[in-house]
Image (cartoon, helix red, strand yellow):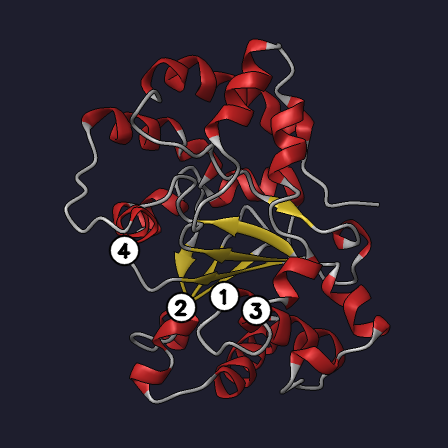
Amino acid sequence: MGNFVNKQYYLPLLNDFCNKTISLYEEVYDQGPFIPYVMPKYNDAPIKIMYVGRDTYSWEPFKTLHKAFIEGNLAKYLDANIRCVTIEKMLKWKNNSGSFFNMIEKLHLLLRTGKYVSDITTIGDKERIILDEIGYGNLFSIEIPPTIKKRYDDSTYCPPKEYWEICDAAKPFETLKSMIEAYNPDCVFVFSWIDKEDDFFEGTDYSQQKELYENGFRAVYTSKQYHTKVIWTLHPNRFSFLRTSVEEMCYYLADTYHKLLLL
């Protein structure tokens, strides 16, 4: 059983995206949009958790999207989308302290087992099964310019207006509301301390819990409409600059999660 994407929910959104953008892509951008999805055991997990990063570093090529659109079978693109990151691929980042996936693997195991795994390469089959419960999203469905510059190795890269139109069309894939309606998570962790709250929470009634706010480290949001809790924190590549570590942040965020259960 492979990763899962809610096709019933995302196919109409992807079709709308393609109708707006297919004609804009040529010689402008070479990657399809990132669509949130979950690992095989997410729907049966005792706690459903989605982990949200900033953006991808490359994704499924545009040619896959274009071919699926021309054939009238965008489900093929969603199938390709869920194969881009698997547990096996996530584990290849090993113990890289700045890796998003290394962080969420260790945090998820701590939340589910109460134990911190310092060396992710030592986990056994039981822990791998637990990792198959993870859900994955991003604040930006389309790579942001700094990422494109890095991937193209071109510091002078300047996105044309068509690129921004593609980004705008991808916004339905980037909201918390869409992730809730597609996957109904109990908790969402966001790993990127950037100003995107208005877009992410669009269409919802989420408000910040001021008593749990710590500048640069933690913002917590709850809703009267949805049961999903949101914990917003920094990207792991910032940990060392702020004199913290993956282990310390895992315990800190796990403690935050348990505090939220009491609200």
Pointer 1: residues within 10 angstroms few (<14), some, or many (20+)? many
Between circles 3 and 2, the one closer to the viewer is 3
Comparing marks 4 and 2, which lies closer to the viewer? 2
Secondary structure of residue under mark 1: helix
Of mark 1 and mark 4, the one earlier in the sequence is 1
Q: Mark 1 points at which residue?
A: 100
Mark 2, other Cα within 10 Å: few <14 / some 14–19 / many ≥20: some
> Compared with residue 114, is residue 11 higher up or lower down, i.e. above or below?
above
Q: x, y percentage for residue 146?
A: 26, 52
Label 3 secondary element: loop
The earlier-in-sequence mark between 4 and 2 is 4
Relative to 211, does residue 89 appear above or below in the rendering? above
- Judging by the rendered image, the residue that carries numbered circle 2 is 235
From this view, report whether residue 165 is shown above or below residue 125: above
Q: From the image, state whether disc 1 or disc 4 is nearer to you.
A: 1
Query: What residue would you read off at disc 3?
Result: 93
Q: Mark 4 points at which residue?
A: 195
C-alpha separation, residue under disc 1 versus residue under disc 3: 9 Å
The amino acid type, in three-letter code, at marker 2 is His
Q: Nearer the viewer, mark 1 or mark 3?
A: 3
